[in-house]
Structure formats: structure tokens, C-alpha cells
Amino acid sequence: MGITMRAYFIRFFLLLKRQLNYRLMTIFLIAMPVCVYIISSVPQLNESEPVRIGMLAAGNDILAHQTMQHLIESSDSTTMEYYEASSADELNNDIISGRTDCGYIFPDNLSACISGGKYSGCIKLVSSPSSMMASLSSEMVFHSMFGIFGQSIAADYASSLAGTDSTASHIAKDYVNERFDYYLNGPATFHVEFRLLDVSGKAQSGTYGTSAPHSAEYQADTQLFPLRGILAILITIAAMFGCSQYVTDKESGVFLAMQGRMTILGRLVYTAIPTILFALSSLLSLMLSGSHSGLSEELSSITVFAAICILFAFALSLCIRKSRIMMSIIPLYAILCLVCCPIFIDLGSYLPPVSVLQKLLIPYYYISVL
């Protein structure tokens, strides 16, 4: 009995040593958590500079200044940043130097142009040929301007319906202004149900609308939301790689001296060693990145997933006896997982056949179930 256990231990140690002889795999195991830690620790890699958009009012037109003020106050500092330029020369120099993507010059008679219907070409757009945000920014400028000007039009129209009665005119005008502000800035009049990935990469549900106007405010600490999906694919590929090495060594006669349970042990160890190593490296990567939901929960889920991958690779080694076929399957399977699994985009939500195919891919269960 002692000799048998010693033989098992020696075989296991030799197989482990053989697996760790692959320097590329060892380097990858170490580099993966190191790279994740560097990316999650450097704020500049997780934040993008906002696109600066300049504005200039040529005169004292009220509509122009209100539009500029509204855009500056409502700027999204992570996407676009509106600012008021001091002169046309400064705006042009900022665009030429690349500090500003584009700019708008409002005329001194903007209100009169809009009221008289002569608005075509009244606002001057200054941009470089390489500008990528001019079209989107123009939509936001006109949306802001007509949001302000539309209230004046609606109030004046309601006031005119009251005729010569000044009291009724003021009441109608005040009522329209109040309701206009309510519908423009008040609670939402519709609901949108959505699913987001939180910082641990797991699905969240939410509602945006009248009953929950702030429930859509999710803020991730990093930009590593695909991390769980990528790690799941790497663990699966590691198990398949171990399976491929077993088939290759079996073809070369490494297991000729083994019989019975020793052969089963070799098959199991070949698939288990790289899977466990990549699972540990993945767990460390998740903990270092901050994209986790707790050590105990992550450890249990990644343990179950590693066991599933080992069984999957073990069954695959029973079905496929040729190393060339096994090696050709690995990249195809990896690409299929990247495309079909909900890592970067969930194609299953748009294409029903893909949602069925997802259930046949091992990484799907770690991303969406575990």
C-alpha cells in the first residue's frame, strides 16, 4: 500500500514538473495579475480626457448667453466639456492646436434670427477636418437652445390666447412656464428596464423612470467589466491545453508504462494542473482589480467553474484521440466564446440562436450563472 501511494506521488510530482516546464505558461500566470493590478491602479488608464468644445457670443443676446450657460452647467466632464472662449482668435488657436475639438460663435441677434425664421447659418461652427464630435455637439447645442427658446414661444402663444385680459394673460403665461419646466426637467414620463454589469461583472437589474429616477446611477470603480469573461475563457482554454498535452504525450508513448488507474490519474492531472493554476491566477487578478464581490464568494464560484472545466476537458480527451485535432479546436473554441458569450456585448439578446449556443459554452456559466 505504501509503495502504491509513493508511486502515485512520484507520478503526480513528475507530471506537475512537466507542466511547469512550459515557461510561456508560467510567465503568463505571473503577468496576468500584474497587468491587471497596473491597469486598475493607474487612474489615467481608467479615465479618458473629455472633449473640449468652445463657445463665443458676439454680443449681448440673451438667448445666446442662456444657451452657453446651460451647456456649461450641464457638461458631462467625462465626455464633453463646454467652455466660453474670450475671443474668436483664442477659439481658433485652440482648435488649430488640438486643445479644442470644435467651437460655436453666436451672433448678437440670435433671438431675432430665430424669431424671424432666418436661423439658417446664423450660428458659426468652427472645426478642424479631423473633428469627430462636431455633429454630436451640434445636436446638443440646438437641443439646449430650443429648450430655452421653446419655453418663450409656448408662453407667448398661451398669453396671446387670453386676448386683452392682462390677468388671464399672466396666469396663462405662468402656467405654461411652470408646466414647461416640469415636463422638461421633472420626473420621467416613461420607464426603461435595463441590465448592467456591476464592478464584479455580474448582472444587475434596474428601472429608470418616474418611480425610481435615481436607480440608474451606477458607477464602476474601473473599466474592467469584461475581466470576468476573459478570465473564464482563459481558464477553459487552460483545461483544454492540458487535455491537448495529454493526448500529445499519449501519442508519443509517455503512458505506455502506465496501466489502469494510473492512466486515469495522468489524464486527470494533465487537465487539472493548468486549470487550477489559471484559476488561482484569475482569482488573484480579480482581487487586485477590485472587480470582485468578496473573497469567499469569488473563491467558491471559481472553484466550481474550475471543476466544470476539468470535467469538460477530461470528457474531451476521451472523445478526441488526435493531438492535431485537439490543437485546432482550442483557438476556434476561444473565438466562439469571445463572440457568443456576453463579455463585450450580449448577442443572445438580439439573436435567439446565439442565446441557445451560449448554453453550450462553458464560460457562459461563470459569467451569467455562478
Image (cartoon, helix red, strand yellow):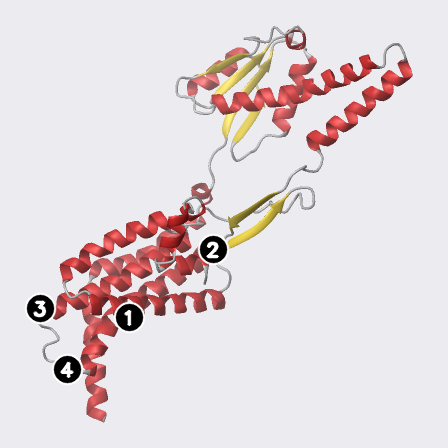
Task: In the rendered structure, find residue 252 and report the number of the disc placed on it.
Answer: 3
Q: Which residue is pictured at 26% across the width and 58% down the height?
A: 27
Can residue 13 be seen here? The reply is no
Task: In the rendered structure, find residue 272 and report the number of the disc placed on it.
Answer: 1
Viewer-nearest of discs 4 and 1 = 4
Looking at marks 4 and 1 on the same chain, the residue that comes earlier in the sequence is marked by 4
Total residue callouts: 4
**In 3D space, how far apart are the residues under numbered discs 2 and 1 (Cα atoms)?**
26 Å
Of the 4 image quadrants, the one containing the C terminus is bottom left
Q: Where is residue 301 shown, x and y percent of the image?
A: 44, 66
Q: Quadrant of residue 166?
A: top right
Task: In the rendered structure, find residue 291 and report the number of the disc placed on it.
Answer: 2
- Hey, what amino acid is under mark 2? Ser
Pointers 1 and 3 in contact (C-beta within 8 Å): no
Task: In the rendered structure, find residue 259 and report the number of the disc placed on it.
Answer: 4
Q: Quadrant of residue 236?
A: bottom left
- Hey, what amino acid is under mark 1? Ala
